Amino acid sequence: LDLLEEAKLLPRITYEQPQALKPPRTDVLTMTTWFAPIVWDGTYNIDVLNAQFQQRGVRIGLATFAIKKYVVFLQQFIETAEKFFMVGYNVNYYVITDRVEEVHQYNFTLGKGRHLTILKSPTYKRWQDICFSRMEIIRNYTRELFTNEVDYLAVADIDMKFSDDVGVESLGDLFGTIHPGYYETQRQHFTYERRPASKAYIPKDEGDFYYAAGYFGGTTEEIFKLTNYCTNGIMADKEKNIEAVWHEESHLNRYFLYYKPTKLLSPEYVWNRPIEESRLIRRYRFICLPKNYQEIRY
Ligand code: UD2
């Protein structure tokens, strides 16, 4: 610890004064009971956040899986990420695929400070095994690679497109996204794993939120802990021939219940419903694409 190091001050910028008695949003919860902010449009000032994060020179990774036919989603995923994901920052895309040759054929034009790395994954017969194995693969690459290259890592589904800004407001030591289908749901109706024999089990009288596995992240250290925990749970279930109801998402939900995320993202960050449906959602930042499950998964 260098006690003589000088504090790095922010540059002068002018902005609207925060009002101690006037919360910017009163229609939504903006703080959990364990004091983790919940990010909604209107709750933060991106200029102040950018000034802070730019000063730290953060490096951000975005990992996604393109296994078997899901390679078709890659082009749009990267192109829209170039427009909206952490614009102005050093970004490493990690495309994890069983079709390395095919992915090499793509020619992406990336902005300054942005790189794309193709990483090899095994292939799997069952789509469920692809979902489960994401945790182990992320864990292993976090240990071997990500931790040397980036400060924060986000893990995202690929059958999605960015359609509004996802910036540094979303970063934190450990962040999860409130699932767009369950933000009004009572905890006993969450689709958690309910069989006590599973390592993903959550009893009916517990649970804060239902989190989507389509977008989560944190520092590489926290992502290692999360993916290691979920991998161990998935393996223990496998020994007993149990598959959690929503695959790795069930294990993620269990982890976030007993190891609370430090920041939550509102469903603006994973949206899978018609656009007009909710007045609460002012920005649709990362949207699930419609897909023919039968066709694409097999
Ligand atoms: C939900 C979750 C997803 C995962 C899954 C588990 C959201 C938005 N989505 O989505 O994160 O928890 O449920 O059942 O929360 N993949 C391939 N090739 C395949 C199949 C999957 O690459 O053949 C990858 C791909 O990156 C895909 C991801 O795995 O985006 C999740 O699979 P999905 O999109 O088919 O799962 P889905 O839509 O049921």
Image: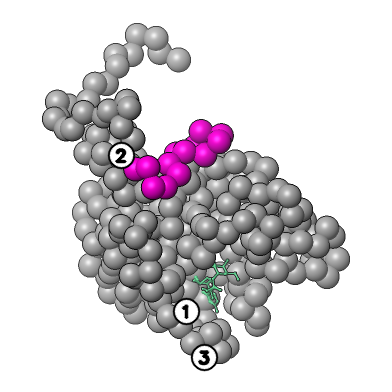
Of marks 1 and 3, which one's residue comes earlier in the chain?
1
Label 3: which residue? Answer: 295
Q: Amino acid at mark 2?
A: Pro
Q: Any mark on residue 24, and which?
A: 2
123 part of magenta stretch: no
**Looking at the image, is mark 1 or mark 2 nearer the viewer?**
2
Residue at 55%, 36% in the rendered image: 33
Label 2 close to label 3 by CB (< 8 Å): no
Tell me residue 212's x, y (percent).
53, 60
Please give left or right for residue 123 compared with residue 65 in the image. right
Residue 293 in sight: yes
**Farthest residue toward the bottom?**
295
- Decide whether the magenta segment is chiefly helix, strand or loop: loop
Residue 218 in sight: no
Quadrant of the drawing holding the C terminus? bottom right
The residue segment tinted magenta is: 25-38
How packed mark 3 is, by other alpha carbons closer than 10 Å (few <14, some 14-19, many 20 or more), is few
Which element type, helix, strand or loop, lies under badge 2? loop
Q: Any mark on residue 70, and which?
A: 1
Of marks 1 and 2, which one's residue comes earlier in the chain?
2
Q: Amino acid at mark 3?
A: Glu
Please give left or right for residue 245 compared with residue 18 in the image. right
Where 53 sits versus 181, above or below? above
Which element type, helix, strand or loop, lies under badge 3? helix
